[in-house]
Amino acid sequence: MDVATSGADEVVAGILVRDGQVLLCHRTAGRKWYPDVWDLPGGHVEAEETVLGALVGELEEELGVVIKEPSGQEFSRLVTNEVDLRIWVIQEWIGTPVNASPNEHDHVEWFSSGAVAGLRLAHESYISLIAEAL
């Protein structure tokens, strides 16, 4: 496992899977981080949060769904000088995912693995990660 360099932002994300599709959020064009791209729902880990607590909180904040804290290791981890991104596959939640954070996203939508390949994504590795998750 790679270790983030000091100064890298800790970020968490969930790959929500339902009926062979994954839920992605389209980031608004005015966002500082990764504007105008499709991204996994999630966000930054705040100083007072645990990584798993941040995942639970971000998915509720952005999508209006409640998940249990995952019990296992993350599905994937992407580490760069700028970001330490931990990703979990989420298959169960309470509530219907909606765009509960319109200041961050202008749209949320379900996609099949094949459809994801044609999207402008926040990171190119998402294509293979989503295919593997589905």
Image (cartoon, rainbow, N blue to C red):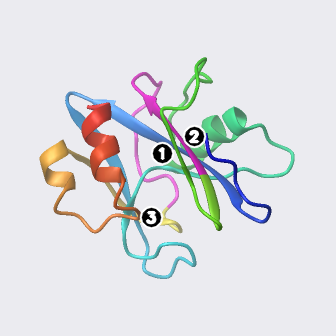
Residue drawn 65% across the image and 66% down it: 81
- Vertical order, 128 against 89 (above or below): below
Outermost residue on the right side: it is 48
User: Residue at label 2?
Assistant: 60
- Mark 2 residue element: helix
Residue contact at pointers 2 and 1, CB within 8 angstroms: yes
Q: Could one spot residue 98 in this view of the protein?
A: yes
Q: Residue at x 34, y 61 (%)?
A: 124
Region in magenta: 85-101
Residue behind mark 1: 63
Sequence-earlier tag: 2 or 3: 2
Q: Is residue 92 magenta?
A: yes
The answer to which of 83 and 59 lies nearer the viewer is: 83
Callout 2 amino acid: Glu
Residue 66 relative to residue 9: left or right: left
SS class of the residue under badge 3? strand
Determine the CA span between mark 1 and mark 3: 10 Å
Q: Is residue 80 in the magenta section?
A: no
